Amino acid sequence: MDIDEKLELCSRNVEEIITFGDLKRLFEKQAETGKNIRGYVGVEPSGKFHIAHLIWVRKVKDLMEAGIEMDFLEATWHAQINNKLGGDIEKIRVSARYLEYCLEALGVDVKTLHFKTAEELMSNLEYWTWVMKAAKKLSLARIKRSMTIMGRKQDEADQDFSMNLYPLLQISDIFYGKYNVCLGGMDQRKAHMLARDVGKALKIKFRPVGIHTPLLSSLSGESRMEMGLDKEEAMIEFKMSKSKPGSAIFIHDSPKKIAKKLAKAFCPPKTVENNPIIDLNRLLLFSQKGFVLKIERKPEHGGDLEVTSLDDLCRIYQDEKLHPGDLKSATARAITDLLKPAREFFEKNDEAAEVLEQMNKFQVSR
């Protein structure tokens, strides 16, 4: 695979790369020296795995295929700071084991992906040296402005002082881990920009490349009713969340449950912007090569229809040639098929099923 092919693989279905030029230089240097490019994605173990995570899971696979050596950071102590699962570190650790099964269920080569825990990183004094270095280069005001990386608003930083440590930990994860590439959703953009700025201030030779995937919106549409939010706060409220039961589809949901959730989902007629059903098609279904959305309808309602592109889907929906109910039903069937391997994995793997049973007993906290 040549450099252009690797760049294409890294770039597909992402919102942005900061910066594309830096990423290209990494691959050029790799070609010259043979030195590995190190990348990571950090995830808080905080509850059940929903389909929005499929977006970055696919990108993990793309980056690994492009020859980037990827680590998966189980951000356990980060999750405790963020009060996930009530801040109970033992429950968070169970959730971390569950994440490993989820990645395997979704087809990630878990023998090649390197799993790291926050405990491993934080047990080394050098890690805390990076925390101090980052702290010396950032103001408290800027730290507070970065609360969106935790899925929180700026004023929530005063609830618990430890929350102010979170951005410093995320920066230290990157520099201590010597990661050239940082993968995350658009909600992680500020963390990666902080790391780049801290690196510049410390005169570190490399600038970590941020690869940011789009966020899948909540099924409920409730965030659209939020008033007085800035762009980043709206992004937090808008995205799919495991802490809002009606807003998410989990990867091991039954076909019946998927159909029920999508039947209740926000899906205004003629509207394709900020429409979660259209977003499911855009980000998860039509992003698959050769995908066809099969719509089943009675003859009096136009008969069956096969849609072969997202543009066609948006056009016929805006022209009112497709009813929201028919779109929801077709999307539910497609999502059910998409998640079938993951669902069967948890049904057939006894250890995974046992951990999932534990997860089902946990109360998810925002």
Image (cartoon, rainbow, N blue to C red):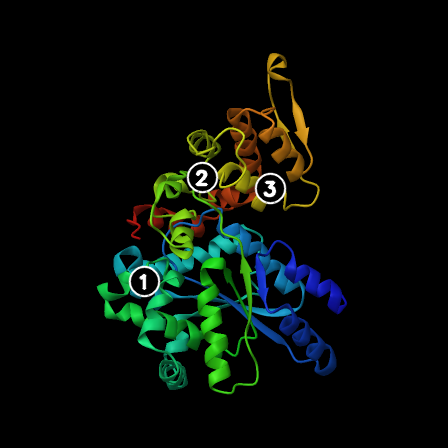
- The residue at 38%/71% (across/down) is 167
Comes first in the chain, label 1 or label 2: 1
Comes first in the chain, label 3 or label 1: 1
Residue type pointed to by label 1: Gln
Q: Which residue is at the front of the view, 132 or 203? A: 203
The crowding category of the residue bearing disc 2, from other C-alpha atoms within 10 Å (few below 14, some 14 to 19, many at least 20), is some
Between marks 3 and 1 in the image, the one whose residue lies nearer the viewer = 1
Residue at image mark 1: 154
The crowding category of the residue bearing disc 1, from other C-alpha atoms within 10 Å (few below 14, some 14 to 19, many at least 20), is some
Above or below for 195 versus 79: below
Query: Residue 149 occupies which quadrant of the picture?
Result: bottom left
Q: CA distance from mark 1 to mark 2?
A: 34 Å
Q: Is residue 309 visible?
A: yes
Q: CA distance from mark 3 to mark 2?
A: 17 Å
Residue at image mark 3: 285
Residue type pointed to by label 2: Asp
